[in-house]
């Protein structure tokens, strides 16, 4: 490790979690976006059918998985992606963390990340020995050598959706400098008041995926966080280079999970059903929070509400913990989140109802 990594953010939340657990009617944990609804039956059946898999799986993924994933990209993202240009990953977090290393980023380089961002973008850059610049303006990079630019739409934590024009500008800027744009799009099927668009869409990329990668996950859309199933797709040259590196490192999605992932990518109906569940929970929490004096900013898509009471985020965390509600402080995602909290929609309906009732108590 080139430098000591910071404390894992959620460890800092332990005292508030202990307070929330002491509530006489139990904790309502809205701090982490962990799926709690059932794994779709067709996915479980595919997993079970492939359980007798004694041999090593392929790093590239089975033809069935890559075809299903490419079909999903074409159908859902509107992106012309060939099966050869899709690579399965063991969830999306390992890819996010390892990608700077796999792309050859290192000392002397600067990785550009969003101003409010999933912490693993920074961690991956630091593990590779690179500097990190948190900014939503590409011009802020100045003279730095920037081989890698992260974008995240819909955003975690804010739920902000970047418009086509903004994404196209980032792509053009990066291409002028030979930088790779990696777009984390794990919440793209959960647009509420805005329609998210992929960096691989022709309106963004001008018809070519050169220098572009999109990261996706089955954790949220299909409740497969426990399976660790994701993908990266885009520039054929970059995907091939990642495949070569991942072969050497032994980064292989287990064969039964590959079969389950193929089934999940081939089916849209279970996604519509899960989206409806989240929509109901979102409406209930959004109304309860605004009635309780919170302001909801952005939150146009994704699994979170980005909320503020106009006070330091840890004051809000403690205030809600006293009511048995655990949320994530906004400063986990950057200093500009210091007056917001992130509130997840991933709790059972009964727990969502409990949170709504407690918020109404004042």
Image (spheres, helix red, strand yellow):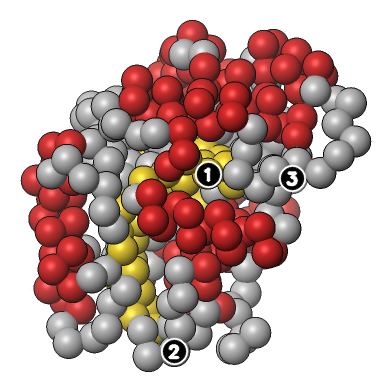
291 or 81: nearer the eye? 81
Inspect this view and state whether residue 256 appears: yes
Write down the quadrant of residue 346 in the picture: top right
Which mark is nearer the camera, 3 or 2?
Answer: 2
Query: Could you tell me which residue is drawn at 68 percent across and 64 percent down?
Result: 248
Q: Is the C-beta separation of discs 3 and 2 under 8 Å?
A: no
Read off the residue under disc 1: 87
347 or 78: nearer the eye? 78
Which SS class for mark 3?
Answer: loop
The Cα–Cα distance between marks 3 and 2, rounded to whole angstroms, is 47 Å
N-term mark: 3 or 1:
3
What number is the disc on residue 22? 3
Write down the quadrant of residue 196 in the picture: top left
Residue 52 x/y as whole percent: 89, 26
Which SS class for mark 2?
Answer: loop
Residue 282 x/y as whole percent: 41, 25
Which mark is nearer the camera, 3 or 1?
Answer: 1
Q: Quadrant of the C terminus?
A: top left
Query: Could you tell me which residue is drawn at 53 percent across and 32 percent down?
Result: 66
Read off the residue under disc 2: 107
Q: Above or below — where is 274 with respect to 131?
A: above
The Cα–Cα distance between marks 1 and 2, rounded to whole angstroms, is 27 Å
N-term mark: 1 or 2:
1
Query: Could you tell me which residue is drawn at 51 percent across and 58 percent down?
Result: 242
Residue 73 x/y as whole percent: 38, 29
Which SS class for mark 1?
Answer: strand
């Amino acid at each position: 490790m080139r430098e000591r990594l910071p404390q894992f953010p959620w460890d800092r939340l332990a005292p508030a979690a202990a307070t929330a657990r002491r509530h006489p009617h139990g904790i309502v944990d809205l701090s982490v976006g962990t799926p709690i609804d059932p794994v779709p039956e067709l996915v479980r059946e595919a997993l079970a059918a492939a359980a007798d898999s004694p041999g090593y799986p392929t790093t590239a993924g089975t033809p069935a998985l890559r075809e299903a994933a490419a079909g999903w990209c074409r159908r859902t993202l509107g992106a012309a992606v060939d099966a050869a240009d899709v690579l399965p990953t063991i969830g999306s977090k390992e890819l996010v963390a390892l990608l700077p290393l796999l792309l050859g980023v290192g000392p002397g380089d600067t990785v550009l990340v969003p101003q409010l961002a999933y912490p693993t973008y920074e961690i991956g850059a630091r593990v590779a020995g690179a500097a990190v610049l948190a900014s939503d303006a590409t011009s802020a990079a100045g003279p730095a050598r920037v081989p890698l630019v992260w974008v995240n739409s819909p955003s975690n934590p804010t739920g902000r959706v970047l418009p086509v024009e903004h994404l196209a500008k980032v792509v053009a800027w990066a291409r002028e400098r030979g930088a790779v744009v990696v777009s984390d799009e794990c919440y793209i099927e959960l647009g509420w008041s805005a329609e998210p668009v992929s960096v691989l869409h022709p309106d963004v990329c001008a018809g070519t995926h050169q220098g572009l990668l999109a990261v996706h996950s089955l954790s949220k859309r299909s409740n497969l966080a426990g399976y660790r199933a994701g993908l990266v797709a885009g520039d054929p040259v970059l995907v091939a280079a990642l495949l070569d590196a991942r072969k050497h490192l032994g980064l292989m999605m287990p064969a039964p999970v590959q079969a389950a992932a193929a089934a999940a990518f081939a089916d849209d109906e279970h996604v519509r059903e899960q989206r409806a569940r989240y929509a109901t929970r979102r409406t209930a929490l959004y109304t309860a929070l605004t009635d309780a004096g919170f302001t909801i900013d952005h939150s146009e898509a994704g699994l979170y509400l980005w909320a503020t009471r106009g006070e330091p985020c840890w004051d809000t965390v403690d205030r809600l913990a006293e009511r048995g509600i655990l949320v994530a402080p906004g400063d986990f995602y950057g200093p500009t989140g210091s007056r917001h909290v992130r509130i997840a929609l991933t709790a059972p309906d009964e727990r969502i109802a409990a949170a709504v009732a407690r918020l109404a108590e004042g």
